[in-house]
Image: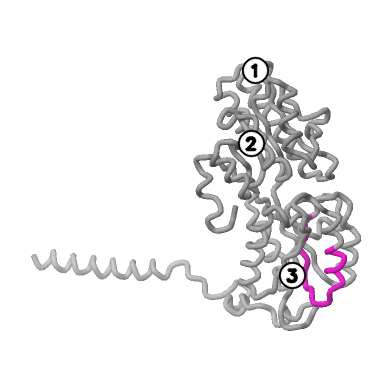
Amino acid sequence: MRRTLLYAASAAVLSLGVSQAFAQSGSVEKAVGGYNFAEAAKEAPGTKDFHSADGHLTFAIVTHTAGNGFFDPVYVGATVAGNMIGAKILLLGSESPVDDPAREIEILNQIVQDPTIDGIIMTTPQIGAYNDIVKAAEAAGIPIATTNSFDATILHRNNISHTGQDASAAAIGGEALANCVLASGATSGSILLPSSTAMGNIEVNNRVTAAFNAIVKTLKDAGKLDAFKVDAGPENVGIDTNPNDPVNALVSLFESRGDAVGAFTANNVFTPPLVKAVAQMGRTGKFCAFGFDLGPAQQEGIAAGNLTGSLGQQPFLQGFWPVMQLYLQIDRGIAAANLDTRAQLVTKETVANVGKRFEN
């Protein structure tokens, strides 16, 4: 009995020792280079006096359309990031509900001359239109980050971070549209991708192409491609549609084809009108309609059955990350780090989960 008790006591002591050792295992006291992590994590002494030298950072975020609600969560994300780092965020943009890069550039030309600005975040929907802004900002010592729409040709692109959704994400919507048509029981018909290249938004053009390719591939994989006509215009960047009267233009397009079974719209200019067009034609719940963005009109359309699904860009990130990137660039010297926000496909089953924290 005594030997048993001694063995049990010894085992308990050994177990206690092992537990204590495991509790401390893996703890890192300092960097391999010898410095203290807590000290290294502190903000640099001169960060708050960068450029404007007024004791705090001020970033301006400028978009090409603040009038339709899409950029609301972008502004929220920028504000959240600004609060985290103690920076003032100016929320600016064209008042228009449709793309208005000319007004955005007008605002940018004013902002870049403002001595209180420490960093600029801007959308770049119009290819080749922002080089003078970049030159002026560089001359003034103001760092730039781009967000949302992507201009691959912008001056010193590799030195400027970009946050946004790659146009290839539209393939998620294209695949969903094709599967919707197949599941509907339709044996033939037209699948249409209306848009407007006159607006000059290369990102939207690329989305249409990505969605078109995904629709074709999905139908082909199902052995049904020959049964349907997929039409995205002669260059697969969209069937030219009037953006100034989009609802009537969409209704006319669908009715003129006579056999339309589905449609995909690639931006906020045409998706809310798609909702209205489906309702106006009396095809609620009977037409595979997919679009882009997740503003109030899209959410209401999905809930009512006039929009089957819509792709979100997770725009909260498109405001949050550029602010953080500029801060890291100023405080840490971190080079441009891009972020792909991907796509969030929202349908009637999931629409109630969108927007609860302003992140739609």
Asked whether 296 or 124 is in front, the reply is 296
Residue drawn at (74%, 36%) of the image: 208
Q: Label 1 sits on what residue type? A: Ser
Q: Label 3 sits on what residue type? A: Phe
Where 226 falls versus 250 (above or below)?
Answer: above
Residue drawn at (69%, 40%) of the image: 273
Asked whether 204 or 302 is in front, the reply is 302
Name the spot of residue 238 as percent of width and height, x first.
78, 34
The residue to which callout 1 is attached is 188
Disc 2 from disc 3: Cα separation: 35 Å
Q: Which element is circle 2 on?
A: strand
Mark 3 and mark 1 in contact? Answer it, CB < 8 Å.
no
The quadrant in which residue 159 appears is bottom right
Where 118 falls versus 239 (above or below)?
Answer: below
Q: Is residue 286 magenta?
A: no
Q: Which element is circle 3 on?
A: strand
Q: Label 2 sits on what residue type? A: Phe
Q: Residues within 10 Å of mark 2 (few under 14, many from 20)?
A: many
What segment is highlighted magenta in the picture? 107-123
Residue drawn at (69%, 23%) of the image: 190
| Closer to viewer: mark 3 or mark 1 | 1
| Closer to viewer: mark 2 or mark 3 | 2
The residue to which callout 2 is attached is 290
Label placed on residue 65: none
Residue drawn at (58%, 58%) of the image: 358
Q: Residues within 10 Å of mark 3 (few under 14, many from 20)?
A: many
The residue to which callout 3 is attached is 59
Name the spot of residue 93 as percent of width and height, x first.
77, 60
Q: Which element is circle 1 on?
A: loop
* Left or right relative to 131: residue 225: left
